[in-house]
Amino acid sequence: MKNLILVLNCGSSSVKFSIIDPINEKKFLEGEVSSLNLPISYIKCITKHKNFYEKKNYKMSHKDAINFIIKKILLKYNKKLFSSVIGIGHRVVNGGDKFKKSVIINNSVLKHLEELISLAPIHNPLNLIGIKQILKYFPNLYKKNVAVFDTSFHSSLPKRAYLYAIPNKFFYKHKIRKYGAHGISCTYILKKFSKITKKKLSELNVIICHLGSGSSVSVIKNGFCIDTSMGFTPLEGLVMGTRSGDIDPSIIFYMNEELKLEIKQIKEILNNKSGIIGLNEKSSDFRYSEKKYFISKRSKISIDIFCYRLVKYISSYFFLINKNIDALIFTGGIGENSKLMREITISKLNSLNFFVDKNKNDIYCKDFSFINKENSIPILVIKTNEEIIIAKDTFDLI
Ligand code: ADP
């Protein structure tokens, strides 16, 4: 074994890691430290030879999680495998307008990443913790660490799509614009669709719905993203697990001025207490609302609003590529698994010639599946694989 890549993904409540051969896409190790900063954390690591599960009855921070991954999982239990790692790929949520492509991390890149924290205050600092800990333990791997950005895919957006209609200085001076997210997933999906259809990337016109705890829709014309539903931050757009998505900004003024809520509280409400959990009042897990769809009014309306918003985005994006559309694609935890969501959403798109085949929709997606009726525009479910893109970009750059 040689030339393997370690992929590190520091998310808001978990650190995911894997060791991948970037050429044949084989995964040798895969794991996650989850429920970070909660009273109990969970550690899971799966390899060909051994599965490892551990529960920690104390609060683990992101730094604790990375230290555990390095000291125990990589250097103790998988030392031989780790000795074949030649580079490390880090997922970074926001590359701002500075990073339009993946980049080898050096001191100057690190400085720019620090400067970008204000654009993604929740995610970028966590991504930076991962990078810094790795560099601390493995100084010999300096310049073998690569940052892969969720925003790069959307750097092709035309100005009319990324600029907000607010005074120009907020863009030119303060860099307030649409950045989007889920770009690494979209890159994988586009490449996979190109393989499936044997069409060149530059010929592809598709709408990709990445629906997970965070959700977004992106529209791709001739292989380039021309619009996406997430905005300056991941708060804009679709209804999500805990995020509101689009709202009238005046609600914020009203909450502040009339309801006397502080900006910090409103931020918490819109980011962590809204969306599916705000509507069903029980759980941000889509499976909860799905299970109760026919018995709980609140669960029903949470899914109905989710699908209604999704339909609005898909139909408006449809007209940006119109008759050239090759496919509508669903991916992400909800996109890949929720038959109910797909059925409700697609049934509202019949007038645009999208028709779901109920039997084909009733699948467990391991790789990809077509779920449309014969005369419909193609509709696919594709299992996303962001780690592969991070591993390949890392390998190519180093
Ligand atoms: P993340 O954005 O954290 O990567 P995922 O893409 O893993 O999120 O998606 C998480 C979401 O997928 C959760 O809301 C979860 O409820 C939903 N999900 C996972 N499995 C299913 C399923 N079988 N049916 C419906 N929803 C599911």
Image: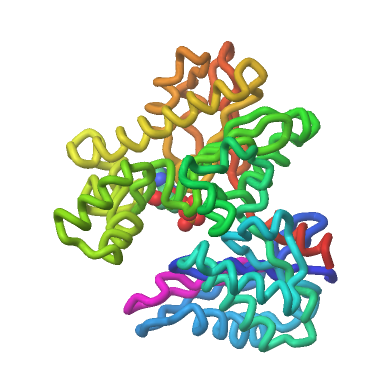
Q: Exactly how many numbered labels are in the figure?
A: 0
Q: Which residue is drawn at 46% across and 67% down?
A: 122
Direction from residue 66 to residue 140 in the image, left or right: right
Q: In this view, does 183 lie above or below 133?
A: above
In x, y percent, where is residue 202? 78, 33
Which region shows up in magenta?
A: 29-45
Does residue 181 appear anywhere in the picture? no
Q: Residue at x 50, y 43 (%)?
A: 164
Q: Residue at x 68, y 80 (%)?
A: 78
Q: In which quarter of the image is the C terminus?
A: bottom right
Q: Indicate the quadrant where residue 56 lies.
A: bottom left
Nearer the observer, 116 or 344? 116
Confirm whether the magenta stretch covers residue 265: no
Nearer the observer, 34 or 301? 301
Q: In this view, does 188 lie above or below 319?
A: below
Direction from residue 251 to residue 188 in the image, left or right: right
Nearer the observer, 331 or 233? 233
Overall secondary structure of the magenta section: strand
In x, y percent, where is residue 233? 48, 54
Q: Indicate the quadrant where residue 279 lies.
A: top left
